[in-house]
Amino acid sequence: MPTRWNSFLFNNVRCEAPRDLRGMTISIRYDRYKPASAPVIYHEGQRLGSAEALDAVANDRRPFPSF
């Protein structure tokens, strides 16, 4: 289940990164000629992965605790 710590705003769209971004300064690379393509997230030259549009429905509630 995604957490709120891996989300950011890019081109007025809330996105989710594949990792925790707390305290990081990231670089975003994207194809400006294909705006629907997923931006790729980098930190200190290392590729962290592709971002996706935030799923607001999946993120509107806390996950159920597992026992």
Image (spheres, rainbow, N blue to C red):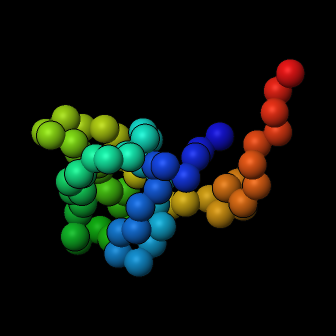
Work out whether residue 49 can be spotted. yes
Provide residue 22's location: percent of width, then percent of height.
38, 46
* The quarter of the displayed image where residue 32 is located: bottom left
Vertical order, 34 against 52 (above or below):
below
Quadrant of the frame with the C terminus: top right
* The quarter of the displayed image where residue 20 is located: top left
Q: Is residue 46 left or right of residue 23?
A: left
Q: Residue furthest front?
A: 23
Quadrant of the frame with the N terminus: top right
Q: Is residue 63 left or right of residue 6?
A: right
Vertical order, 4 against 67 (above or below):
below
Provide residue 19's location: percent of width, then percent of height.
42, 39
Question: Which residue is rendered at x = 19% and y = 35% of the image?
Answer: 46
Q: Residue furthest left?
A: 45
Vertical order, 45 against 31 (above or below):
above
Q: Residue furthest top?
A: 67
Question: Which residue is rendered at x = 32% and y = 47% of the image?
Answer: 23
Provide residue 26's location: percent of width, then percent of height.
24, 51
* The quarter of the displayed image where residue 42 is located: top left
Provide residue 16's location: percent of width, then percent of height.
47, 53
Question: Which residue is rendered at x = 59% and y = 44% of the image?
Answer: 2
Q: Is residue 15 left or right of residue 30?
A: right
Q: Is residue 28 left or right of residue 3?
A: left
Q: Nearer the viewer, residue 45 or 39?
A: 45
Q: Nearer the viewer, residue 39 or 60?
A: 60
